[in-house]
Amino acid sequence: MRQDVIDRAYALLGQRRPDWSLDQPFYVDRDLFEMEMDLFFNRQWLFAAMSCEVPEIGDWLRVDIGRESVILLRDKAGAIRAFHNTCRHRGSRICTTEKGHANRLVCPYHQWSYELDGSLARTRLMGPDFDRQDFGLVPVSVGIAAGFIFINFSADASGFEAFRSEVEPYLLPHGLEDAKVVHTQTLVEQANWKLVIENNRECYHCAGSHPELMHIITEFDDPDDPNIKPEYKALIARKAADWDRLGLPHAHTHGSDRYRAVRLPFTGGMHSMTMDGKPASRKLLGTLSDTDLGSVRFLNLPNSWNHVLADHAIVFRVLPISAEETLVTTKWLVHKDARENEDYDLQRLTEVWAATNDQDRILAETNQLGIRGSGYRSGPYSEAIEAGTRDFIRWYSREMMATLAPLAHSKTSPQENAA
Ligand code: FES
Ligand SMILES: [Fe+2]
């Protein structure tokens, strides 16, 4: 890890104007990006996939994050595990396609094979002194919350239980373990991952860019936001009473500024994120029977936001590729027994967010292009409508400063470092 990169990032964060956008290097600099991945991003709980994507023993899928690659699989006991996708022989990637099914994982280079618990099963010609026990796959920490699989690269990953216990009550009634992914949209956006998240955390841009989304969603997602209109506040209160009767949690979580869950109603008599506001799937998620359950908005910094409705769910995953390139994957889920063209129509199900994501891609990429120029200066977030973005950058800056503080060169002040 380069000391000058750590010192420079620490200095820039130390002297930045609070609640303004970050300095240019945080969006474009390759060295800073590598440092950020190793010391910060990959030490967070990252949304990787849904458990229903590996429903059977031996099902696996690959998740790439920056230069890391991880195999997620369901083992013989039915548990979900994660391993670095790197062979213990000479380091080849083992899984080279996106997903598959196997009783054992076999490295394509010299065919070392691994059990589903990561232990080395077979090798050829390694001699009498070779002890297979020393060569199991390197594990990655896994946490599961209501069908969402999270991974963490830190050896001492912690904090998952508090997170899980706070968000699961919002999500469990929607039965996402018994759902299926029926459509995936993959966008490689030419933008830094933080710009993708910054864009998602505000709806300042929505009125100008999202005609499909704007007839469904409101710009404000905190029921306590002083900018919420009185009519919407009244609707929230009415629906809150209904949801209390159904035993569905709805109030904004307060356990952390890294994540949150909140259930909010749709306006205009709409029940779902479709063009006409009617449910996209006749078969509802889990064992739900009421279509008017609004949307559970589930945020997990640094890499995911999600909408979980009565009839379907849309999950969003943001994975950095490089300083100026980010993979944004959106998946649409319905009940596992829902039948295409009978219970749901793929076009109706996906059109609002497919269009919205592409509009957001253009916004993030255009933002990136502007930041690249030498005329870029940090700018202020709107107190009234960019609080989500402000809070993300506050969280990011605070966490990065805490990470870098023990590593930064102690003898120089931030100003000297920046010079
Ligand atoms: S590198 Fe995997 S078997 Fe040789
Ligand atoms: Fe947007």
Image (cartoon, rainbow, N blue to C red):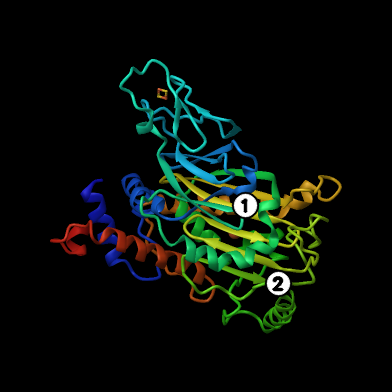
In this view, 106 is above or below 357: above
Where in the figure is residue 239, as x and y percent of width and height? 73, 77
Could you tell me which residue is drawn at 38 percent across and 48 percent down?
37
In this view, 367 is above or below 221: above
Find residue 292 and name its label: none
Could you tell me which residue is drawn at 38 percent across and 15 percent down?
125
Find residue 265 and name its label: 2
Going by the numbered disc 2, the residue's amino acid type is Pro
Residue under label 1: 357
Q: In this view, does 179 lie to the left or right of 79?
A: right
Front label number (1 vs 2): 2
The local secondary structure at tag 1 comes to: helix
Q: Is residue 261 left or right of residue 397?
A: right
Q: Residues within 10 Å of mark 1 (few under 14, many from 20)?
A: many
Image quadrant for the C terminus? bottom left
Could you tell me which residue is drawn at 35 percent across and 33 percent down?
134
Is ligand 2 within 8 Å of the beta carbon of the residue shown at mark 2? no
Where in the figure is residue 181, as x and y percent of width and height? 68, 46
In front of the other: 106 or 26: 106
Could you tell me which residue is drawn at 62 percent across and 52 percent down?
357
Residue 299, image quadrant: bottom right
The single residue placed furthest to the front in the displayed view is 128
Q: Is residue 254 visible?
A: yes
Going by the numbered disc 1, the residue's amino acid type is Asn
Q: Is residue 277 left or right of residue 146?
A: right
